Image: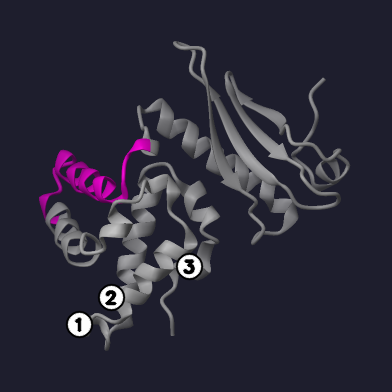
């Protein structure tokens, strides 16, 4: 029998356990809710079946604790749908680094006949991203709040940026777009959302 996880009342009544409670989104695609503590709160996870191999893939989505409890199911489902769509289109972000993702993002602009956008992105990445070897060598799915914040702090110390916080904000937004391009809105959520993407005052 299916167990509801789409309402606050239903989730609050669930028993604490390590195995997620699964909600079917489509054939082979599920949204899971893992309840680890009593009362409100829990984490979300997506599960997808590869019909050709029979293997299950999983993607952590975070807890969406910054959002009201009654909106968390919809946010988790949206993040799961993006990941499902990304995988369906052949996307496999788990094995690429931030630097490789930057290169693919530039190539995407070229493939879409947007040479000016590709040139602009390539210039930005070379100037502001590639110089941070630690960040660019990090698998894109392993980005943490601390890593991105360290990068942001480094940007504020660049002579060209000391007087213009708008440039920092722009670079942060480009990183956010990059993460989303690879179907990783969920990574952005795990990085604790909006405060991370805003430059320090």
- Residues under numbered marks 1 and 2 in contact, where contact means CB atoms less than 8 Å apart: yes
Look at 25% across and 62% down and name the residue there.
129
Q: Which residue is mark 1?
A: 160
On whether residue 103 falls in the magenta region, the answer is yes
Scheme by which the image is coloured: one colour
Q: Considering only vertical position in the picture, is 61 above or below 1? A: below
Segment colored magenta: 95-116
Q: Main secondary structure of the magenta part?
A: helix
Residue bearing the label numbered 3: 196
Write down the residue under mark 2: 167
Apparent side of residue 131 relative to residue 1 in the rendered image (left or right):
left
Task: Decide which of tag 2 and tag 3 comes sooner along the chain.
Answer: 2
Q: CA distance from mark 1 to mark 2?
A: 9 Å
Please tell me whether mark 3 sits on a helix, a strand or a loop.
helix
Q: Quadrant of the C terminus?
A: bottom left
x, y percent for residue 127: 17, 66
């Amino acid at each position: 029998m299916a167990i509801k996880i789409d309402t606050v009342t239903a989730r609050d009544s669930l028993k604490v356990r390590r195995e997620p409670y699964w909600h079917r989104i489509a054939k082979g695609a599920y949204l899971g809710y893992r309840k680890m503590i009593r009362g409100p709160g829990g984490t979300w996870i997506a599960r997808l079946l590869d019909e050709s191999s029979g293997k299950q893939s999983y993607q952590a989505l975070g807890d969406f604790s910054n959002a009201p409890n009654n909106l968390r199911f919809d946010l988790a489902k949206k993040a799961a749908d993006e990941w499902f769509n990304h995988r369906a289109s052949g996307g496999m972000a788990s094995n690429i680094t931030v630097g490789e993702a930057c290169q693919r993002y530039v190539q995407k602009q070229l493939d879409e006949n947007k040479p000016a956008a590709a040139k602009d992105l390539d210039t930005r990445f070379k100037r502001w991203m590639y110089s941070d070897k630690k960040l660019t060598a990090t698998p894109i799915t392993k980005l943490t709040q601390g890593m991105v914040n360290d990068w942001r702090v480094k940007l504020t110390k660049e002579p060209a940026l000391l007087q213009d916080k708008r440039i920092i904000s722009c670079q942060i937004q480009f990183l956010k777009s990059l993460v989303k391009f690879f179907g990783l809105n969920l990574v952005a959520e795990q990085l604790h959302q909006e405060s991370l993407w805003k430059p320090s005052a």
